[in-house]
Amino acid sequence: MNAPGLRLFVDDLHDQFGRWPLAYSSAGGPELAEVLAIGERVGEGNDADFARAFRQAGEANVARAAEAASAGHWHTASDLYLRASALFGTALHPLYGAPVDPLLLEIFERQSEAFARGLELLRAPAIPLAIQCDGVTLPGYLIPAQHKTPGTVRPLIIFTNGYDATMPDVYFASAVAATRRGYHALLFDGPGQGAVLYQQGVPMRPDWETVVSAVIDVVEQLPIVDPRRIVISGWSLGGYLAPRAASGEHRLAACIADPGQWDLGASVASFARTLGASPEQVDDLSLLSDEFLEGMQEVIESDPRLRWSIVRRGFWVNGVDSLRDFIEVTRTYSLVGREADIRCPTLITLAEADPLAASAEALYAQLTCEKTLMRFTAEEAAADHCEMGNRSLLNTRVLDWLDGVFAEPTGK
């Protein structure tokens, strides 16, 4: 989340990671003063100091939640456990990379425990799921629509993360708003995400239709889910994964891509072009020489943000250990040739300062289904990645669109 003039952490990457949960405050996540206090504790500390400071804040919320629960204040306990899960999740980001840092696993376990306890104490408790997909167990939760009669059949939104986030992130970012509006919400860790990556070591895969088909096989059997109104919504890299799923899984009634992403290999090709790759190499990245890749690696290693994004995160999530292999894997994340296979109404978001939205208009232009392009601007404080400066605006407009798709005000 970008906020001009607002500096919470000394280190640039810490500031990027540490500001992220501020987007969750309207849904019950950490408040600004809480994050400011954490920033003061971290000071000029290193990644482990950052992780421990956020963990400390998470543990403080867990302790308060336990006190509330012992006093019978179940709603307060739920809120505090869930807030703790967001704080624990923020602690994980600077620890990314292979081999897996034991501290990351330790904090992730605490996050998972707090999240499960918080969901269990909701007015309509979440339903834990174990989804089988190609021999891998994908953990998930179905969170029933809030303020509805228990057991009511409602539309379901399947929320899919991208590279970075865990289930508590998407819970605060979108699921709270969706359940308040009258939608059931499904959260899960797919390959390359959360528990499936951290604990099982299973990397990301581009054919997300296979993953989402396994999810739908389970949830369409649940009596509270309307199988005719199942939606896929993806944010960050999920802006590729969601339309990819819709291109092969036609039980989906609608698709939301935030932001829409057409061809991830094209972004790598653009990066190579800026470093002097020839037109032939840009067209076929497999032609990049070892010498050129060494130079590209040096550029990446010299930039802390690129190093974290590509080497520490990208290599790990995709199960590779070289830049050439990372580029080859990235090229497989493409919707080129699959656009006409997306048949359900599709919403593409485009925040004007989000670099991941660079191909959103191109994807929108190629779609042949019923489609909407939804723009977000700096004037709305929603121009950055995934509209994190004004996530509540994103949720309001997206859910209004979805209400229109289903031709009913689901909030009644």
Image (cartoon, rainbow, N blue to C red):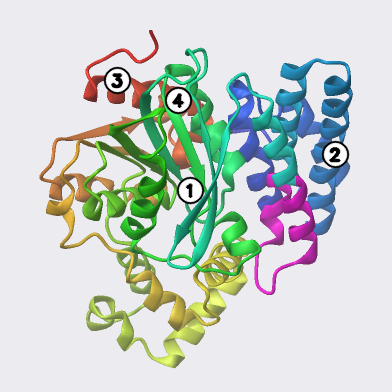
Residue highlighted by disc 2 = 59
Disc 2 marks a residue whose amino acid type is: Glu
Q: CA distance from mark 2 to mark 1?
A: 25 Å
- Residue stretch in magenta: 88-110
Residue highlighted by disc 1 = 161
Under circle 3, the secondary element is helix
| Dot 1 alpha-carbon crowd within 10 angstroms: few under 14, some 14 to 19, many 20 or more | many
Image coords of residue 10 (percent x, y):
76, 47
Disc 3 to disc 4: CB gap under 8 Å: no
142 is higher (above) or lower (below) than 17: above
Q: Earlier in the sequence, mark 4 or mark 2?
A: 2
Disc 4 marks a residue whose amino acid type is: Ala
Q: CA distance from mark 3 to mark 2?
A: 38 Å
* In-front residue for pair 80/269: 80
In the current view of this chain or complex, which residue is farthest to the bottom?
290
* In-front residue for pair 81/288: 81
Disc 1 marks a residue whose amino acid type is: Asn
Residue highlighted by disc 4 = 178
What kind of secondary structure does the magenta stretch mostly adopt? helix
Q: Is residue 46 visible?
A: no
Residue highlighted by disc 3 = 403
| Dot 4 alpha-carbon crowd within 10 angstroms: few under 14, some 14 to 19, many 20 or more | many
Residue 395 placement: quadrant: top left
Under circle 1, the secondary element is loop
Q: CA distance from mark 1 to mark 3?
A: 22 Å
